[in-house]
Image (cartoon, rainbow, N blue to C red):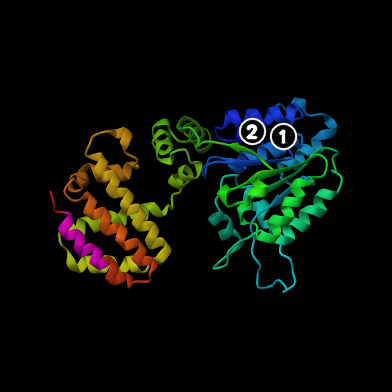
């Protein structure tokens, strides 16, 4: 992967290239920043650069072309990945689970793109109720791999995704690896919550912080990569708020937010017209969604209450809605006003912890709807 394929982050990309060109590459770096900003994309691009890939292919020597071809497939023998996994039922009790147990799935997964979440990864490998971790077997495996001479005579690169997922034993052994690295070995740590990594590991890395992607960069990427027109690209880029993953969510034709919007519109219309029987049916339908989806739905409802309230101020720069959401808000927004916005918000906020506490969802959502009947008419 080339640096030019990373969305935005040009200054950081140039800094990393400069470190490599000047032979000043730290033995361990940690790329930190908000979700969806491109931390993993930068890590893979930097690893690819260290292993020979260049923007200008004429700069690649003939003898290095085979190595670069392997880099592009992310199958270079000197490129190693470590990431959270779980112990399957088919594994023996004494088996030390490592990333290698899931490497085929991992390579197929990241070849789809370097912007992803832990939930997307766990969904790929079929994790249900188990937590994913980086186990002690991982540090043992990396020790063996990195003790070997680089097959291509250059760098050996280990990308550790979500190092905060290392268990205590693994973290302690990984610390020793970082303290005594083999020659021309580079560790690239890519956390989401760096504060959860033990301090002794953090202190042995050079930390590089990236910011959310600039809106204009997301807009350009949407036009270039996804074929959007400028108007839609601008709208989605604003809503993404620097997060490429959010931009991709908005493009998903099956996005659950569309379902949530329909449920929100239906709820608001039924509460305003006091359709008690229909509200009971609405509550029963929502009760079938499952707790996690119900919580996401309520977070979306709170978002829509806020956006409809802000819409009343006629300040487009303060609004973050899709065209469909805005079409509804153009008529509905006056019903979310100074007289009721706080009470409606509080009513919806109270619902979320009650979902977690296993309250009867049919009763919970029907009661919320009855309260909204009173609140929605306040002016």
Quadrant in which the N terminus appears: top right
Query: Which residue is label 2 attached to?
Result: 3
Residue pictured at 37% horizontal, 52% vertical: 258
Specify whether 291 is left or right of 45.
left
Query: Which residue is label 1 attached to?
Result: 49
From this viewpoint, is residue 11 visible? yes
Q: Between residue 210 and residue 100, name the one nearer to us.
A: 210
Looking at the picture, does residue 90 appear above or below residue 70? below
Residue pictured at 23% horizontal, 63% vertical: 369
Looking at the picture, does residue 81 appear above or below residue 49? below
Determine the main secondary structure of the stretch shown in magenta.
Answer: helix
Residue 145 picture location, percent across and down: 81, 52
Residue pictured at 41% horizontal, 55% vertical: 256
- C-alpha distance separating marks 2 and 1: 8 Å
Q: Secondary structure at mark 1?
A: helix
Q: Secondary structure at mark 2?
A: helix
**Magenta-span inclusion, residue 368:** yes
Specify whether 152 is left or right of 81.
right
Q: Between residue 337 and residue 282, name the one nearer to us.
A: 337
Residue 61 picture location, percent across and down: 82, 29
Residue 32 picture location, percent across and down: 58, 41
Mark 2 neighbour class, 10 Å CA radius: few under 14, some 14 to 19, many 20 or more: many
Residue pictured at 50% horizontal, 41% vertical: 244
Residue 216 picture location, percent across and down: 46, 30
Task: Say the numbered circle drawn on residue 88.
Answer: none
- Mark sitting earlier along the chain (2/1): 2
Q: In the rendered structure, which segment of residues is drawn in magenta?
A: 366-376
Q: Between residue 218 and residue 193, name the one nearer to us.
A: 193
> To which quarter of the image does residue 45 belong?
top right
């Amino acid at each position: 992967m080339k640096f030019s394929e990373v969305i935005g982050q040009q200054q950081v990309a140039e800094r990393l290239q400069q470190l490599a060109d000047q032979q000043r590459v730290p033995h361990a770096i940690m790329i930190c920043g908000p979700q969806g900003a491109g931390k993993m994309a930068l890590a893979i691009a930097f690893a690819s650069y260290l292993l020979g890939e260049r923007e200008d292919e004429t700069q690649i020597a003939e003898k290095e072309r085979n190595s670069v071809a392997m880099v592009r497939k992310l199958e270079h023998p000197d490129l190693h990945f470590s990431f959270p996994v779980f112990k399957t039922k088919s594994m023996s009790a004494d088996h030390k689970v490592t990333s290698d147990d899931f490497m085929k799935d991992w390579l197929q997964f990241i070849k789809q793109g370097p912007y992803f979440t832990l939930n997307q990864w766990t969904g790929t490998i079929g994790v249900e109720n188990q937590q994913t971790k980086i186990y002690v077997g991982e540090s043992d495996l990396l020790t063996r791999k990195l003790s070997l001479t680089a097959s291509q005579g250059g760098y050996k690169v280990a990308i550790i995704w979500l190092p905060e997922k290392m268990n205590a034993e693994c973290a302690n052994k990984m610390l020793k690896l970082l303290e005594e690295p083999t020659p021309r070995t580079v560790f690239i740590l890519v956390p989401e919550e760096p504060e959860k990594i033990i301090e002794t590991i953090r202190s042995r890395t050079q930390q590089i912080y990236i910011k959310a992607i600039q809106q204009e960069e997301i807009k350009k990427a949407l036009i270039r990569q996804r074929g959007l027109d400028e108007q839609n690209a601008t709208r989605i880029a604003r809503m993404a708020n620097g997060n490429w993953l959010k931009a991709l969510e908005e493009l998903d034709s099956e996005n659950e937010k569309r379902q949530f919007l329909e449920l929100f519109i239906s709820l608001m219309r039924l509460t305003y017209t006091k359709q008690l029987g229909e509200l009971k049916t609405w509550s029963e339908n929502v009760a079938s969604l499952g707790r996690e989806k119900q919580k996401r739905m309520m977070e979306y409802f709170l978002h829509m209450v806020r956006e409809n309230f802000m819409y009343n101020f006629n300040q487009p720069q303060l609004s973050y809605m899709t065209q469909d959401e805005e079409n509804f808000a153009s008529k509905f927004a006056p019903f979310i006003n100074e007289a009721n916005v706080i009470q409606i918000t509080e009513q919806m906020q109270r619902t979320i912890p009650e979902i977690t506490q296993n309250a009867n969802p049919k009763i919970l959502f029907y009661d919320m709807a009855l309260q909204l009947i009173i609140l929605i008419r306040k002016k």
